[in-house]
Amino acid sequence: MSINGSFQVAGQKVQVGKVHARKLVTVALDEHTITAYDAETPIAAVPRRSTTELNRTRAKHQITTPGQPRLRA
């Protein structure tokens, strides 16, 4: 999840709110909906605007624990 609480999947941007910013979420694509889960709890379900197939997956994330410095390249 980005720092503003949104993500993009299948060409569609989904906003779930800043309260979920920087969390690692699971996204499920159905025929008509996109659902985001925080662990087992659904946090957003939005109608899907596109019927195209998902042809690639790419995820970027940085998970750091408190007190652990970030690595910079």
Image: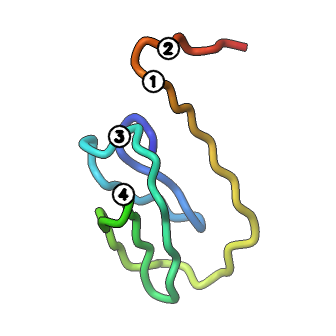
Q: Are marks 1 and 2 in contact (CB under 8 Å)?
A: yes
Residue that badge 1 annotates: 65
Quadrant of residue 44 within the rendered picture: bottom left
Dot 3 falls on a residue whose secondary structure is loop
The type of residue carrying mark 3 is Ala
Sort mark 1 into few (<14), some (14-19) or many (20+) by Cα contacts within 10 Å. few
Q: CA distance from mark 4 to mark 2?
A: 23 Å
Q: CA distance from mark 3 to mark 1?
A: 15 Å
- Closer to the observer: label 4 or label 2? 2
What label does residue 68 carry, if any?
Answer: 2
What residue is shown at x 35% (from left), y 55% (from top)? Answer: 15
Residue that badge 3 annotates: 21
> Is 10 situated above or below 72?
below
The type of residue carrying mark 2 is Gln
Quadrant of residue 16 within the rendered picture: bottom left
Asked if residue 53 lies left or right of residue 62, the reply is right
Which callout, 3 or 4, points at the residue further toward the start of the chain?
Answer: 3
Residue that badge 4 annotates: 38
